[in-house]
Amino acid sequence: MNYAIAAVSLLVLNLGILWLLMAAPIGLRTIRVRRHFDSEPNRIWEALYPLGKAADWHPSVISSQPLPGEPGLVERSLSHLDSKGRPIVRRLAVEKLPGAALAYEARIVEDSALDPSFWQAYVERTAVTPSEGGCEVTIEHTDRYRGLAFMIFRYFAMRREVRALGQWLKSGRSSTAGVFEHPLTQTGMAILSTLILWPFFGLHPAGLMLSTMLTVVIVIHELGHMAAYRAFGHTSARMIFIPLLGGVAIGGRPYDTRFEVATCALLGAGMSALLFPVAVLFHQAVEAAWLSQAFDHPALMFLLILGAFNLLNLLPMSRFDGGQIIRQLFDSKRMLVTASFGIACVILWVGYRIDLPQNALLAGMAVFTLVSLLGASNVKPRFALEEMRPAERLMAGFGLYAALFIHGFAVIYACDRLFG
């Protein structure tokens, strides 16, 4: 399979999956999880009801207590951290539901980490129904979703919560740690992603080498994000590898400042840029006859994949690193449009410089326009991010400029020697 066709096919497929996961108008949906427990209904009720005697059974719940002078309101403190590194505090409007089952409905009216608009359509319902040999627990979460990603995440989070409840009932202890985040699982996911990508580059050793290189480039990119998260105090930052779509670095708390957002987004391409001179040294060592000629083609192909992947990530689109950076750098719509146009022109010029067909460049512009329609995330923080100081704005701006031109030059350097 031609490498250009493979690249276009991957781009179109990823674009469709990205739209489905992040922007598809799913609407108001209810997620439901049921499980039977061989336990007394009242014991489970005391654990699940926000004002129950054992409401702090869950490892993420520090306390859950009524709000003085506010009937029906419950204040719950969580071990998850807000942007200032403090435990998140939520206020819930709780109402018991009539019927034979022990049941309640709750809405989140205030959150110290997220704006109330995030919880506007959210309702959770929990029912404990006596049954033969124990009881049946039903947990429902209703919310308005845009894209399948958060809906899928919430479903598995609910399943994990029910599993943790079973652990607590048996041993008095519970854990929310999952198999999916385990390093061995993520290593397996990276290998699986490599094998899925292999056919796009051809089912031969060279194709496997290219798919492996792409996986390595993705891992290095996400490690850069993780390094930035850790530097800003995200102690539980981790990387999740998703076959075909690549990796996602996840921080341990919401962002606090605009400089933090820009730096965490920039460091993916920033760490990758450190490998540019290494690949060039390999190429020059071959030219100087210090290394075997067999190292030359892999080194240049790795440089091409490294530069192209990070250059595309710097496109000024809301879901990409480039879009996140320029949104922090510029406040006015006019400057955002100007910066976006400038970055897009630089990347298109790189494509023109390496003799990409005119049709491919036009297709690239169409893809750029379509992805731009995905829009920004609707997760709004409770408090506005701290503004950048002039020195921080200068550092982030020059960092974006450096990453853009380093990876653009990497693509040109590799293509001139591979296809020139």
Image (cartoon, rainbow, N blue to C red):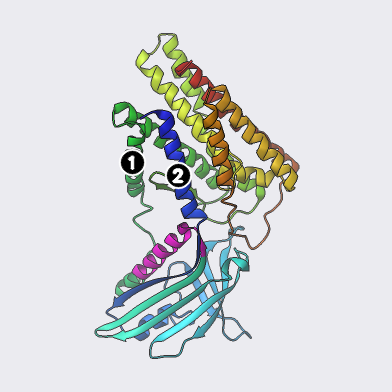
As drawn, the residue found furthest toward the front would be 359
Q: Is mark 1 on a helix, strand or loop?
A: helix
Q: Is mark 2 on a helix, strand or loop?
A: helix
- Nearest the eye: 367 or 55: 367
For image coordinates 58% across by 55% down, the residue present is: 377
| Amino acid found under the numbered disc labelled 1 | Ile
1 vs 2, front mark: 2
> How dense is the environment of label 1, judged by Cα within 10 Å: few (below 14), some, or many (20 and up)?
few
* Residue 247 image offset from top left, x and y in percent: 44, 45
For image coordinates 27% across by 79% down, the residue present is: 38
For image coordinates 64% across by 35% down, the residue present is: 343
- The residue to which callout 1 is attached is 196
Would you say residue 103 is visible in this rendering? yes
* Residue 126 image offset from top left, x and y in percent: 43, 79
* Residue 186 image offset from top left, x and y in percent: 36, 47
Distance of label 1 from label 2 (alpha carbons): 13 Å
Would you say residue 238 is visible in this rendering? no
In-image side of 275 versus 369 (left or right): left
